[in-house]
Structure formats: structure tokens, C-alpha cells
Image (cartoon, helix red, strand yellow):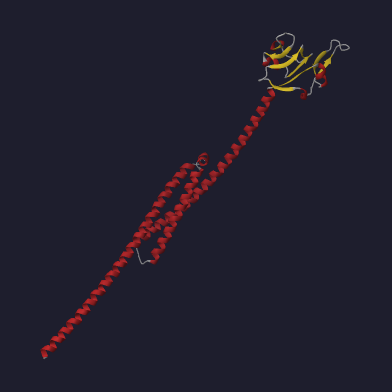
């Protein structure tokens, strides 16, 4: 009987001890899983931080490259700014976008770092360095904007000067064209004496009682009574009269009166030497019967 009681006591003790050990094992397993989860979470956060830092560093590198490209494009040369304005504006817009993206990532990292219990001195130092670099890029970008504004003003001034020069050139061209037109313009009147006298183109001067009087051009004759011609384009003047008389003064060897095939009528006046013919007068008056 005593032996039975002892055996039951030992068995009960063994059973109780086994239950306690199993519970301890389960608790240790849960703690282990918890530690692994925490470590995994920290590793994930650290990986996220590293990726974000890498993105910011890449952005800073791209910004530096684009700044160099813009500085080379402007290089205090307004003509370069003028020819590359769209490309420079696009690069500045891209720099601004990269800066905004980097600042957003930096703010996100700082927020997550504060909310986590991670204390990584090297990471915090790296973030501080990146913050300084972003601040410096802000200063450089502002300086770049200032330079570009100054050069844009120079471009505007140059455009004003170019416009002024073009206007002056156009005015000079108009004056030259007008002078050339006047230089090449001559005035021609063909008709009977009565017709041209009535139009105040010709008059008789000298003589006695009309005898021996000379026909001549009226000073300041009415220009509306004349036909304008371009002396560089006109070599013949139609007459179609039995006879013709040139009233105005022109060298006799610079023109000829050409008759028709019958020889009974003057068909036209042919100018054989235009320079010589028009040298003495830009007015031509021909009387016909």
C-alpha cells in the first residue's frame, strides 16, 4: 500500500513537471518569434532608409549635372541663352522637381526615424549631410535663377536693339528705294501744241507777233499732264504722227525718230543712249502734228 502511494506521488510530480516545461518552451518560442519580427521590422525600416538615401543621392548627382549643363549653356552669353531658352527652362523645371522629391523623401525618413526606436548614429549623420547638401542646392538654384534673370534682361535689351536696328535698316531701305524710284522716273508728254499748251506743259517764247517764237517747257509744269515712266525699262515712246518735234533738251545723238514702213509717219522715238538722253532732263515733251 505504501509502495502504491509513493508511485502515484512520483507520477503526479513527473506529470506536473512535464506540463511546466512545455509551457516554458512555448513561451520561449513566442519570445523568439517576437524578437525575429522586431529584428525583421527594423531590417525592413533600415532597408527603406537606405533606398530613400540612395534615391536622394542620385537626385543630387542629377541636379549637379544639370546645373553644370545650364551654366555652360548660359556662360554669360545672351545669344546662347536666346538659342537654348526652352532647353534651359526644361532643365530648371527638372531640377526643381528633383529638389522637391528629395525634400519629400528626407522629410519622410526623418519622420519614420523619430517614430521608430532605431538609433543609428551613422544613418543620422548621413541624413544630416544630405540635409546640408539639399540646403546648398537651394542656394545654388536661387543663384542660377538670378543669373538667368540677368541674362534674360540682356537678351531683352539685345532684342530691343535688334528691333531698332531692323527698323532703321527698313527705313533706310525705304529711303533708298524711294530715291532709286525717283532717280529712275521720267515724265513724258506727247501731243499737239494746242493740247500741251492747254495743259500748261509748253509755251512759246520770243519772236515777233508769234513769228520766230521758240516752243519750250513751262517751268514748274503740271506733272499730272505727264506720264511717268521707268527710264531703265523704257526705250521707245509712241508718237504715230506725220511729223514730230522734241521740245525738251536732249543730245541729238542719244535718240532717233523712227518712221513707219511707208516713211510717211513717225511711229516712235527710240532712246539709243538712255544715260546720255536723260542726263540733261528727266522731262520729255514731243509735239506732233
Q: Seen in the image, is 279 located left or right of residue 125? A: right
Q: Is residue 279 visible?
A: no
Q: Position of residue 102 (x, y in %)?
A: 43, 55
Q: State the residue at coordinates (13%, 86%).
A: 7
Q: Position of residue 275 (x, y in %)?
A: 67, 16
Between residues 149 and 209, which one lies in front from this camera angle? 209
- Relative to 187, residue 51 above or below: below
- Quadrant location of the N terminus in the rendered image: bottom left
Q: State the residue at coordinates (39%, 54%).
A: 55
Q: Residue reaching furthest bottom?
A: 1
Q: State the residue at coordinates (54%, 45%).
A: 150
Q: Quadrant of residue 192?
A: top right
Q: Residue reaching furthest top?
A: 263
- Relative to 11, residue 168 above or below: above
Q: Quadrant of residue 152?
A: top right
Q: How many marks?
A: 0
Q: Position of residue 81 (x, y in %)?
A: 51, 42
Between residues 90 and 226, which one lies in front from this camera angle? 226
Q: Position of residue 78 (x, y in %)?
A: 53, 40
Q: Seen in the image, is 115 located left or right of residue 236? A: left
Q: Quadrant of residue 43?
A: bottom left
Amino acid at each position: 500500500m505504501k509502495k502504491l502511494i509513493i508511485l502515484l506521488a512520483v507520477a503526479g510530480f513527473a506529470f506536473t513537471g512535464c506540463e511546466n516545461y512545455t509551457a516554458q518552451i512555448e513561451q520561449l518560442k513566442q519570445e523568439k518569434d517576437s524578437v525575429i519580427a522586431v529584428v525583421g521590422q527594423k531590417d525592413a525600416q533600415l532597408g527603406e532608409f537606405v533606398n530613400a538615401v540612395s534615391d536622394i543621392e542620385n537626385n543630387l548627382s542629377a541636379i549637379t549635372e544639370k546645373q553644370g549643363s545650364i551654366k555652360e549653356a548660359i556662360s554669360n552669353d545672351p545669344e546662347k541663352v536666346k538659342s537654348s531658352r526652352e532647353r534651359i527652362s526644361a532643365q530648371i523645371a527638372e531640377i526643381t522637381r528633383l529638389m522637391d522629391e528629395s525634400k519629400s523623401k528626407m522629410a519622410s525618413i526623418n519622420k519614420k526615424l523619430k517614430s521608430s526606436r532605431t538609433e543609428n548614429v551613422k544613418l543620422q549623420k548621413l541624413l544630416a549631410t544630405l540635409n546640408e547638401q539639399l540646403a546648398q542646392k537651394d542656394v545654388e538654384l536661387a543663384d542660377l535663377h538670378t543669373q538667368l534673370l540677368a541674362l534674360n534682361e540682356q537678351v531683352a535689351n539685345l532684342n530691343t536693339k535688334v528691333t531698332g536696328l531692323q527698323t532703321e535698316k527698313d527705313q533706310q531701305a525705304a529711303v533708298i528705294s524711294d530715291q532709286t524710284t525717283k532717280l529712275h522716273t521720267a515724265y513724258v508728254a506727247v501731243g499737239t501744241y494746242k493740247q500741251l499748251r492747254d495743259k500748261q506743259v509748253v509755251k512759246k517764247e520770243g519772236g515777233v507777233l508769234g513769228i520766230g517764237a521758240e516752243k519750250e517747257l513751262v517751268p514748274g509744269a503740271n506733272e499730272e499732264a505727264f506720264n511717268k515712266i521707268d527710264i531703265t525699262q523704257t526705250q521707245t515712246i509712241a508718237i504715230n504722227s506725220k511729223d514730230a518735234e522734241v521740245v525738251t533738251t536732249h543730245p541729238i545723238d542719244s535718240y532717233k525718230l523712227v518712221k513707219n514702213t511707208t516713211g510717211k509717219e513717225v511711229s516712235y522715238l527710240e532712246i539709243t543712249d538712255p544715260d546720255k538722253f536723260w542726263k540733261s532732263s528727266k522731262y520729255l515733251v514731243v509735239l506732233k502734228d
